[in-house]
Amino acid sequence: MQAGRSDLALEAAENLGFGTAKWREMAGVTAVESHRRGYGVTAITVSSARASAALDKPMGRYVTIDLRPYFRREPGFFPRAAECVAAELRSLLPGDIGRRPVLVAGLGNGTMAADAIGPTAVGSLLVTRHMVRSAPRQFGQFTAVAALCPGVLAQSGMETLETVRAVVREICPGAVVVIDALAASSRQRLCATVQLSDAGLAPGSGVGNHRLALTEDTLGVPVAAVGVPTVMDAAHLCPQGEGEEPLFLTPRDIDSRVRELGRIVGYGVTLALQPGLGIEDITGLLG
């Protein structure tokens, strides 16, 4: 039988007995659970090659935010969600962020809802590099943010890594933030979770379409990844036989979910990169 796929480090940890004595005895991995702005946060740090192999995740820090309270429309649900994403992302970025430009890459196919988190998030991102360059006296207090939506190989004929790396060489950013859709193994986390990591990202890995990874090693600058699971391998519900084509499921309201989640991520990344701004400031500047 084919095993179902998941991009979430937390789900990989759960498969290894997260929270049990067996998990606590695993060397090279730690986990801390907390709450921020009303949302559950689990931070997993993978610090050894053995733990990396066991979890099938590169070494690094993985932060999972549970956004289910957002969809219960609890008071202040949107600003609290964006602020939670911002705070966790800021902890993964270099401490001197703001002194050099930051490149934000929204990965995926914007014409397909389940793959459009990246481009949708960029639509809610405050892009400032051109403002800082043309009017430094008025906008010098802003972090210079550039954005890129490279599309997918079938659209451009270029690997995502090739496109992003070319832009990195041109603008010399201090960090790159990559945003992409992920795959989950749990129905409860589907379109209700954000995973952030300092280990980079391999586009398409969750659906078995592995592309060249975007990491600090391949780009030459720190890379923070932001991902939202928008698909679920059907093998988690109904195991498939060997040789069968994989089947992926999405929520029936995937279009509206992606719009909302893309806005949360876009605002969250903006708040992380522009700590002097608030939600209302960003809304006004984007308008």
Image (cartoon, rainbow, N blue to C red):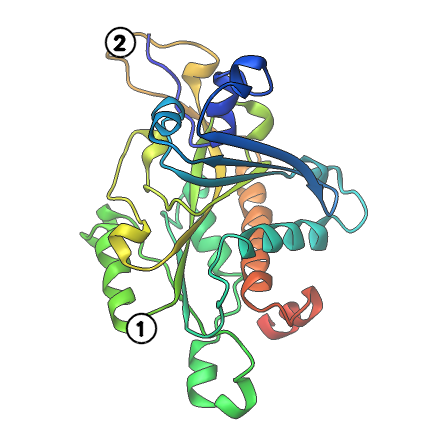
As drawn, 241 above or below 229: above
Q: Is residue 13 left or right of residue 73?
A: left
Q: Residues within 10 Å of mark 2 (few under 14, many from 20)?
A: few
Q: Position of residue 212 (x, y in %)?
A: 24, 44
* Label 2: element kind: loop
Q: Is residue 267 left or right of residue 173?
A: right
- The residue positioned 72% from the left and 37% from the top of the image is 69
- The residue positioned 44% from the left and 29% from the top of the image is 28
Along the line of sight, the residue nearer the viewer: 46 or 228: 46
Along the line of sight, the residue nearer the viewer: 163 or 9: 9
Along the line of sight, the residue nearer the viewer: 54 or 258: 54
Disc 1 from disc 2: Cα separation? 46 Å
- Residue 2 lies in quadrant: top left
Q: Is residue 159 left or right of residue 111?
A: left
Locate the N terminus and report the quarter of the image it occupies.
top left
Task: Name the amino acid, label 1.
Answer: Ile
Q: Position of residue 162 (x, y in %)?
A: 21, 55
As drawn, 30 above or below 222: above
- The residue positioned 60% from the left and 48% from the top of the image is 260
Q: Is residue 260 left or right of residue 120?
A: right
* Label 1: element kind: helix
Whether residue 252 is visible, yes or no, is no
- Do tag 1 and tag 2 residues touch (Cβ < 8 Å)? no
Q: Position of residue 120 (x, y in %)?
A: 48, 54
Q: Which mark is residue 277?
A: none
- The residue positioned 55% from the left and 53% from the top of the image is 91
Q: Which residue is mark 2?
A: 242
Task: Name the amino acid, label 2.
Answer: Glu
Q: Which mark is residue 171?
A: 1
Instruction: Name, please, the residue furthest toward the right.
Output: 75
As drawn, 98 above or below 245: below
